[in-house]
Image (cartoon, helix red, strand yellow):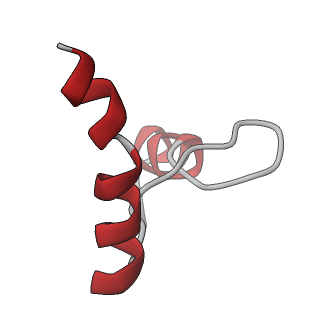
Amino acid sequence: MIPEDMVIAHRSRALNPDNPFIRGTAQNPDVYFQGRESVNPFYDKV
């Protein structure tokens, strides 16, 4: 029914502990702002 090469390709893209990969993350605006503010001292030195 489904070509085996397509099944293998699909399984190779799966998330698993042997091959960790971050696909996307979610942050609230307050957490994003804190992260951006934390790098300000480095920009100030430039």
Does residue 31 appear to the left or right of 19 in the view shown?
A: left
- Note whether 20 is above or below 28 in the view shown: above
Q: Nearer the viewer, residue 29 or 8?
A: 29
Q: Nearer the viewer, residue 4 or 32?
A: 32
Q: Nearer the viewer, residue 8 or 24?
A: 24
Residue 26 on image: x %, y %: 39, 77
In the picture, which quadrant includes the N terminus?
bottom left
- Note whether 22 is above or below 2 in the view shown: above
Which residue is farthest right? 18
Does residue 46 appear to the left or right of 13 in the view shown?
A: left
Does residue 9 appear to the left or right of 41 in the view shown?
A: right
Q: Residue at x 29, y 70 (%)?
A: 33
- Note whether 1 is above or below 37 in the view shown: below
Q: Residue at x 63, y 55 (%)?
A: 15
Residue 32 on image: x %, y %: 33, 69
In the picture, which quadrant includes the C terminus?
top left
Residue 20 on image: x %, y %: 68, 43
Q: Residue at x 74, y 52 (%)?
A: 16
Q: Nearer the viewer, residue 10 or 32?
A: 32
Examine the image and state in which quarter residue 39 appears.
top left
Which residue is farthest top? 46
Residue 5 on image: x %, y %: 45, 38
Examine the image and state in which quarter residue 24 appears.
bottom left
Q: Residue at x 47, y 51 (%)?
A: 10
Exactly how many numbered labels are in the figure? 0
